[in-house]
Amino acid sequence: MLRGFWYPALPSAAIRGRAVRTTTLLGLPLVLGRTTEGQPWALEDACPHRGMPLSAGTFDGREVECCYHGWRFEPVSGQCRTIPSLAAGARLRVDRLFARALPAAEADGSVWVHVPEPEAGDEARPPVPRLPVFGRRYRITHLSVDIPCGVDHGVIGLIDPAHGPFVHASWFWRRRDSIHEKARVIEPIEEGFRIQGHAPSANSAPYKLLKVYRQPVVTTIEFTLPSTRIETIRCGAYWFSSRAVVTPVRTGESRIDFCAAWNVFRSVPFFVSIFRAFAKVFLGQDRDVIVRQAVGLRHAPHMTLIDDADRPAKWYFELKAALLEARRTGGPMKHPIPEPVTLRWRS
Ligand code: FES
Ligand SMILES: [Fe+2]
């Protein structure tokens, strides 16, 4: 599980009024809320006094009060404001005590939390990730599924090109016997790689719908650390953009947070609902196969990653190792893909 990145914590709409919500990221229990001004905040869900979950206390829109001894905290900074048990003249500097606050920010309908590296100070953080959009008017939707595996198996499932005909075989996506050879040019990008723009798979039914626009369709897929896959489809002035993040919850537990935006088929009634129904089936297929795989993974079996179909999975492990090495040495990250390469597989 990689620290030092932003992760989607909860849907924006789930954090309303003075209610607080809990979640877990990278094994860290969190409590989230929103100030009266609407600013999201995230605290480690443990009081710095004696560890009571702060989510068991109360929040009045300005301060969080622990339910055990009533210590009060400003939640954006985590700074302690009040310790009710202190006698007059007590020398303890209350304002030097902090609940552990994590940076929280809102983007594309989610509240994101930056999980810092253990030793990190308050140095510059990258901006919150944004879903690429190509215009001002678009629809956006979100879906999440819990998956019973660690982030690594989630990621390699996400970037695995070979499971489509077996896991996603269905009338609306593709037929199993439509498997054929594909060649894709992959280029290195910062902390990841990109499948260069190509015409989408001829055996994927949803892409065929775009033919109504009578324009060439170009799709681009990229993966970046820690665990993000972004696919954009452009068709003249029309576009569709999606992002899947494998969010590490704790060891052996993750979530796929999926977000899509588009300006296609705006005149089709109920297109958002139709799209969500299909996306749910699709993500459900990925979850079901991981649920079954988890039985085998319990015994930490040996993996056999083959070329070229599992090359993206190998790159993922190499990128991760290169990032950790760069952090360890303080030097630049040595990219495992020196130049664009062509991969061939059947799917
Ligand atoms: S444990 Fe929170 S105030 Fe004592
Ligand atoms: Fe899949």
Image (cartoon, rainbow, N blue to C red):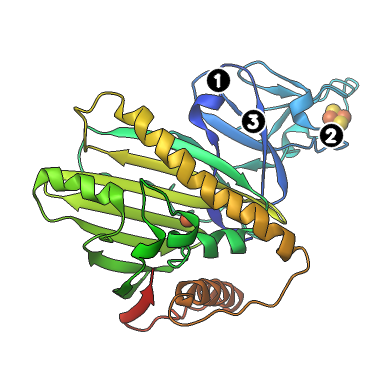
Position in image of residue 45 (x %, y %) = 74, 36
The quadrant in which residue 219 appears is: bottom left
The quadrant in which residue 185 appears is: bottom left
Mark 1 or mark 2: name the one nearer the start of the chain: 1
Between the residue at mark 1 and the residue at mark 2, the CA separation in whole angstroms equals 35 Å
Position in image of residue 141 (x %, y %) = 39, 34
Q: Which residue is mark 3?
A: 75
Q: Residue at x 11, y 44 (%)?
A: 213
- Label 2: few (<14), some or many (≥20) within 10 Å? few
Label 3 sits on a secondary structure element that is loop
- Label 3: few (<14), some or many (≥20) within 10 Å? many
Q: Which residue is mark 2?
A: 92
179 shown above or below 332: above
Does ligand 1 reach within 8 Å of label 2's beta carbon?
no
Foreground mark, 3 or 1? 1
Three-letter amino acid code at the position of disc 3: Pro
Between the residue at mark 2 and the residue at mark 3, the CA separation in whole angstroms equals 20 Å
The answer to whether one can see residue 30 in this image is yes
154 shown above or below 205: below
Q: Where residue 16 is drawn, which disc sits there?
A: 1
